[in-house]
Image (cartoon, rainbow, N blue to C red):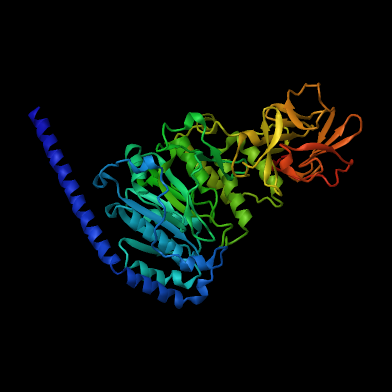
Amino acid sequence: MAHINNRTRQGNRASSDNKNSRRNTEQQIAFKYSKLLKRNEDLDNLLKVILSRNSESVIYPFPLNNSAIELSPIRRNIPDTRYMDCRRITYPDVTTMPTVSVVIIFHDEPLQLILRNIHSILDKSPPALILEIILVDDNSTLEYLKDDLDLYVSFLPNVKVIHNQKREGLIKSRMTGARSASGDVLVFFDAHMECNIQWLEPLLTILMEEPTAILQPRIDIISDQTLEYYSMNTGIDIRGGFSWDLRYSSFKVPLQFKPSDKTGHFWTPVLMGNAIAVRRLHFFRIGGFYEDLKIWGGEHFDLSFRNWLCSGHVYTVPCSRVGHLFKKYAGYSFDGDRVEVIIRNLMKVAEIWLEEYKNIFYRVTIAATPKMPKLTKHDNKSIAERIQLKQTLKCRPFQWYLDNVFPDQIFPHRDALVFGEISHWGSQRCLEVHGDIVGYTKECNIHSILPQNTFTFTKNNKFLYKEKCVYIDDTDYELRVGTCNKTARVVDGVWKFPSPVKEGIIHFEADDKRYFCVNMTDGTGVVEERAGPIATPCSSSGSGCTVWSFMYRFADI
């Protein structure tokens, strides 16, 4: 017994020595960093020199406000967007926390955005925790992202740059950075991120308790026009999911998955992909990023599905806040057709993970894609290897994920022609059911999936809301929902959606040979006077009727 106690005391002394050593290291790093940042004015001057001698590179090939980029300081104060309860949390001593390698990929990114990202990491993180920041330049063409960037970061602690000799894409470049990292935890950032106060400690605390988890911070927004940093604190918790064309989509957190308070982390079926934290050993044990996905697209689905089905959980952490600048479109080349590259990536993800549900993906994607790419022999070999990895990791079937992680996913009817949200882009409204009446709502977005907005038009001309039928009331000609065998107060006839695409008129041919269209108004032109759409008389061709847009159209395969 004494022997055990002696070993315990020795262990405690060793633990204490390790903590003291870690604290000394932290103090040394903090001193080194503060000493460097005393030359902050010199760094500002250096940046001015770099920009002035690269004047052609100052006009960025992106849909961004160049003046805002130039005028916004590299190191700036941003609002603390955390919930008040998050600010009261006491986290473990940083000397007990794992070290971190931050991996940032860029290709022809504005230099100021990259530097703001780096400085925000250094400014908003305990110095001892940031073992290294690894920048991977994916063969940029802008000159100031070569030697000038190397020169600037040489004045910052623990920052290094890897320059790809050819274009590799985001996914392979992230793996290049990960393989060169030595921190306990990997954090993958897009280049245009900005960290908020105490962003790191909530992530590391969870990874200390659950080393097989993969995490994402709560993402704030950086305006692409003003660079203003702000939060979408609407009071509604949102988690990531997917639409059936494998597009990242937002879903309200179902009641059974809500944390007990606002500070709690919660399950998210799919990572957004712009900010990811994961234990390095766990990341490589489950296969890292799938490197045969080219350039960009699909990697966050693949990693999310793999962790859920083969290893652990995926969480959103609301007390960790990081801003992301959402560009309207990619400002860089894809070394090929952008749409084809992304769709081919998503086809691989579907083949590996969706199992019996992959036909839904193909039916939606084929209908929306004029020229569908074909998988090559190399693609099929690569897919087979990843399926073998699933078997090695003893992954669960995809049905388990849908039943347990993502039960709020909405499934189309087998005979669906068009499906999903029905929107009118001119008024930015979509259809929503209130009681038994089809009304309007402005809470609609093709990437924000809301079950109460989901309708179906079938091949046999049924207009459905969930399992109920939509019909025209024969007294006020409003649209209502009811059982499909309902006859009272119903205009008898057949619904038609004559368009060959997902946009078109919603037409109705009555048994008495009258024709109706579902229109925004009753002819007054004032939408606000009505709570919902109305069926109005029209010609057999439906000319002049309101054009609606469904979320998906389905192809026959």
Indicate the quadrant where residue 111 lies.
Answer: bottom left
Image coordinates for residue 267, horizontal then vertical, percent: 46, 36
The answer to whether 20 appears left or right of 83 in the picture is left
Indicate the quadrant where residue 517 lies.
Answer: top right
The extreme right residue here reads 513
Along the viewing direction, whichever of 542 and 143 lies nearer the viewer: 542
The answer to whether 240 appears left or right of 541 in the picture is left
- Determine the residue positioned at 55% across, 38% down: 251
Does 92 sit above or below residue 329? above
Image coordinates for residue 361, horizontal then vertical, percent: 63, 41
- Residue 176 visible in the displayed image: no
Along the viewing direction, whichever of 442 and 211 lies nearer the viewer: 442
The extreme front residue here reads 529
Does 448 sit above or below residue 415? below
- Determine the residue positioned at 55% across, 63% down: 64
- Residue 246 visible in the displayed image: yes
The answer to whether 131 appears left or right of 512 in the picture is left
Quadrant that contains the N terminus: top left
The extreme left residue here reads 2
Quadrant that contains the C terminus: top right
Along the viewing direction, whichever of 235 and 366 lies nearer the viewer: 235
Image coordinates for residue 401, horizontal then vertical, percent: 52, 33
Does 98 sit above or below residue 39? above
Image coordinates for residue 275, horizontal then vertical, percent: 44, 50
